[in-house]
Amino acid sequence: QVQLVESGGGLVQPGGSLRLSCATSGFTFSAYVMNWYRKPLGKERELVATISSPTGSTAYADSVKGRFTISRDNAKNTLYLQMNNLKPEDTAMYYCNADRKGVMIYWGQGTQVTVSS
């Protein structure tokens, strides 16, 4: 059974930091491109960051470049998103996504991030 379980979300003040984790099981983690998406309330879903395997090459949305860092631990089957200098516009539900050539795609249930003073 495929599982992607996000954690680490919460309420943080502007300028603060959070680290999201996505623990996975049931598929060959190292064979998948892993992504973080987010969906603000009432808005479209947005691709935030992506990381390949095994090279670990990364890409980011312009809105988070220089503030967010995506990483993965293939030995632990876990994906991470370090978020620094958070802004109110980062408030959204954050989702972990596993994608193998656009054919096999899995999603987590999401974790809420709220940036507010």
Image: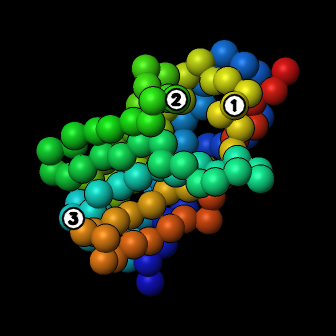
Q: Alpha-carbon neighbours of circle 3 within 10 Å: few (<14), some, or many (≥20)?
A: some
Nearest the viewer among 29 and 114 is: 114
Instruction: Name the residue that disc number 1 marks.
Output: 89
The residue carrying mark 2 is: 63
Say which of marks 3 and 1 sits in front: 1
Instruction: Name the N-terminal-most of marks 3 and 1.
Output: 3
| One can see residue 44 in this view | yes
Badge 2 amino acid? Ser
The mark that comes first in sequence, 2 or 3, is 3
SS type, badge 3: helix
Quadrant (top left, top right, bottom left, bottom right) of the C terminus: top right
Q: Quadrant of the N terminus?
A: bottom left
Residue drawn 76% across and 22% down?
A: 13
- Label 1: element kind: helix
Q: Which residue is mark 3?
A: 31
Evaluate if marks 2 and 1 touch, with contact meaning CB atoms under 8 Å apart.
yes
Please name the amino acid that badge 3 sits on: Ala
Query: Height in image: 101 above or below 6?
Result: below
From the viewer's side, name the closer residue of 96 and 4: 96
Q: Is residue 18 left or right of residue 57?
A: right
Identify the residue at horizontal 24%, vertical 50% (top origin): 52
Sequence order check: which comes first, mark 2 or mark 1? 2
Residue 65, given in percent of the width and then of the height, sits at 43, 25
Mark 2 and 3 residues: CB-CB less than 8 Å, in contact?
no
Question: Marks 2 and 3, Cα distance to the nearest angstrom?
Answer: 28 Å
CA–CA distance between discs 3 and 1?
Answer: 32 Å
Front position among marks 2 and 3: 2
Mark 1: give few (<14), some (14-19) or many (20+) Cα within 10 Å: few
Image position, residue 16 (x, y; %): 66, 20
